[in-house]
Image (cartoon, grey):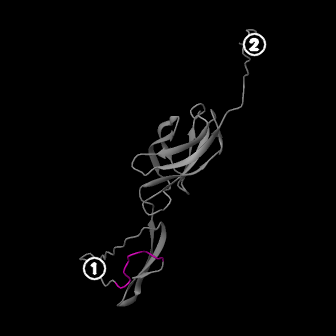
Amino acid sequence: VTDAGGLTGLSTADNDTSDAAGNVTFSFNESTVGVSTVDLALNESAAVNTSVNVTVEAAAVDNVTIDSFEADPATAGDSLNITVNATDAFDNAAVNQTLQNVTVDAETDGEVRDAGDVTLSNDTGNATIEVPAGNLTTTGVQNITVDADDVSNDTQQLTVDPAQVTELSVADTSAPVD
């Protein structure tokens, strides 16, 4: 057995014997996503050889982190898109998986996105989560936390600026001021 692709834990000196059906089993422990090539050959016969590709996919989502806010500072009352990255326990991008019951909490506004599932991209393990308009309303610096079932969460600071003035009222000035 020769490992041309870098699998972790595959012993290239294995001298395992075959079972009654002629099958030989090799084991390995790999934590890096990708495709590795393993060459198999019979020492007694150069004519008996083959190569196989071993594909290692990401494990289940273990961690979610906030990558960026669409607007920083954000504007009170506006919707806000948050880009998150999800990884497995080995720090591989958790591609083509779903985060379950994702919530977004703001330090002073509470839950600003109702729980719902979020599908991660097929190539990067990223997703965009929308906080609907009208939910993030308190100005100042807020800690924003993204959380999902069975994963570690992430908290980042976001500055929220006041919205533009849309109405101006003038107080009744006809009464005398003492």
Q: Does dot 2 land on a helix, a strand or a loop?
A: loop
| Residue at 45 percent of width and 60 percent of height | 58
Q: Is residue 11 magenta?
A: yes
Q: What type of secondary structure mainly makes up the magenta span?
A: loop
Residue ranking furthest to the right: 174
Label 1 neighbour load within 10 Å: few <14, some 14-19, many 20+: few
Q: Amino acid at mark 2?
A: Thr
Identify whether 53 is placed above or below 157: below
| Residue at 76 percent of width and 9 percent of height | 174
Q: Which residue is mark 1?
A: 18
On the picture, is 100 further left or further right than 71?
left
Quadrant for the C terminus, please: top right
Identify whether 133 is placed above or below 19: above
Point out residue 94 in the picture as x, y percentages from the top left corner: 48, 56
Point out residue 91 in the picture as x, y percentages from the top left corner: 47, 62
Q: CA distance from mark 2 to mark 1?
A: 99 Å
Residue 102: numbered disc: none
Between 154 and 99, the residue placed more toward the observer is 154
Q: Does dot 1 land on a helix, a strand or a loop?
A: loop
Residue ranking furthest to the top: 175
Q: Is residue 51 magenta?
A: no
Residue 12 falls in image quadrant: bottom left
Q: Which residues are magenta?
A: 5-13
Identify whether 135 is placed above or below 45: above
Identify whether 113 is placed above or below 89: above
Q: Which residue is mark 2?
A: 173
